[in-house]
Image (cartoon, rainbow, N blue to C red):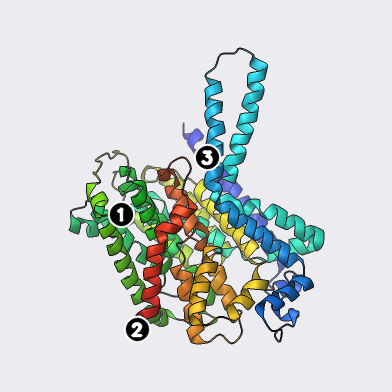
Amino acid sequence: MCNICVMPALRLLLLTFCLFGVWLESAIAAGPSTSGTAEIGFPKPLEEYNDSGTPGVFRKLAGRVKADPVNLFATIIFACAIVHTFLTARFMHIAHHFQTELEHLADQKEQAAPEIEKRRDFLQFWSQFFHFFGEVEAVFGIWLIPLFVVIALMKGWPFLVGYVTSQNAAEPIFVVVIMAIASSRPILRLAERCLAQLAALGRSTPAAWWLSILTFGPLLGSLITEPAAMTICALLLRQKIYALKPAKRLAYATLGLLFVNISVGGTLTHFAAPPVVMVATKWSWDIGYMATKFGWKAIAGIVVANIVYFLLFRSELLNLKVMHVEEKEKRRPIPAQITLVHVLFLVWTVLTSHYPALVVLGFLFFLAFVEATPRHQSVMRLRGPLLVGFFLGSLVIHGGCQTWWIEPVLSGLSKWQLVLGAMLLTAFNDNAAVTYLSSLVPGFSPASQYAVVAGAVAGGGLTVIANAPNPAGQSILAASFGKDGVSPAGLAVAALIPTVIMVAALMFLP
């Protein structure tokens, strides 16, 4: 029995070591250069277009397409991927239709066996096909295939290899590891105890838990980073709220509020929120600047948004009935020293988040520690974190091909146009990519810098792709929304009111 339990873990460790070895070898081969596209020649560096004097954004974009037609094809493919994200629920519905028919055939007797087996194979294939196309985390990876084909045919294989290997994989690797550690039983139990103290002020009712998780949970993102805060909040919401089968309106409202609050909750510091990390060094934003310019306004926005939604859904929240179903094994006390070790691994991952080699090495030691303390650990499920990492890695590759149009679009906007434009772009692209690209715009004033980041973080809950931690939250909570998963339209509607509140807080508070 012991060997049966240990061997999968050993295979997992071996696979992780192999992946790390491959990555390290490629990193050494690539060398220390950070010049990026300037060396590989794709995408064309913005300064090489020599179109600073071209009047009008449309003429400038047309000239850039003429200079490098791959720009247009890459953006069309990116737009198709975005449209795909809004169709995932439909694909899931089709997959379940095939699966239902397959289960019906499985109950039939062996009459006309060859025809039945052929039909079963057909249904099995298309069920899995549409299920894969219905996974939000897989969408941008799927659309990497036509992007790679276009680049390889129009530019050549060396350009494709050079471009893909030049992309920074630090954020996807960090999110995978932080999700895995933050979802461990000791960390989750610690966060639950802290939030339970706050929920106890409201007699630990579901409504009290709802307010506690959505108010104080997102603020943890400024300390342990947004991906970790998202993982902890989503897991607790699944246990304390979604397990009680709330109405669909409340379920979507809670998800939209969670995504928006997490997006702004990491702005109290300069090292926790990806859209802030992308610009903090270049724009000289330190913890003092973030706390005074963003942090207290973010807290005010979170509190107001939570109060508004609590009043709107007060009756539904108060009518949720507590389920006193606790497994004895899950309630086993966890020694303080084990929790401390997990916290130290979490701190190590946060401190080394920009150095993938150190993050991966720390994760390997974490896996070894989990194997050494099995009685106090839950089963390590890496499917969710790996899918989210795949999502972010694919998004980084797609986003690198969009600089040709984002830069001229942002550079010609006023303060309020920047806020609204950043929100709109964030809804269709990761907000960290939007703020990073804005940092490339020459001559950006401090007011314009603030406006872009304010719009990017405020709009981080409108779609799943708007903020890096959102796929992690959706991965954890998707099963609570039925067989079709989370509807993109339903999420956008649910996040609209909190988004407006956050914009007002960030732009109108002194």
Does 95 appear above or below 225?
Answer: above
Residue 310 occupies which quadrant of the picture? bottom left
The earlier-in-sequence mark between 1 and 2 is 1
Mark 3: amino acid:
His
* In this picture, residue 99 sits left or right of residue 68: left
The earlier-in-sequence mark between 3 and 1 is 3
Q: Position of residue 373 (x, y in %)?
A: 40, 46
Q: Which of the two marks, 3 or 1, is nearer to us in this view?
A: 3
Residue under numbered circle 1 = 192
Q: Marks 1/2: CA distance?
A: 35 Å
Tell me if mark 2 has few (under 14), some (14-19) or many (20+) residues whose alpha carbon lies within 10 angstroms of its own: few
Q: Which of the two marks, 3 or 2, is nearer to us in this view?
A: 3
Contact check, label 1 and label 2, Cβ < 8 Å: no
Using the image, tell me which numbered label, if any, was put on residue 93.
3
Mark 2: amino acid:
Pro
Q: Position of residue 484 (x, y in %)?
A: 48, 42
Q: Name the residue rendered at 47%, 60% in the picture.
A: 469
Residue under numbered circle 2 = 510
Q: Quick one: 287 or 485, which is closer to the camera?
A: 485
Mark 1: amino acid:
Glu
What element does badge 1 sit on?
A: helix
Using the image, tell me which numbered label, if any, was put on residue 218.
none
Q: Marks 3/2: CA distance?
A: 48 Å
Q: Marks 3/1: CA distance?
A: 35 Å
What element does badge 3 sit on?
A: helix
* In this picture, residue 375 sits left or right of residue 13: left
What element does badge 2 sit on?
A: loop
Q: Quadrant of the C terminus?
A: bottom left
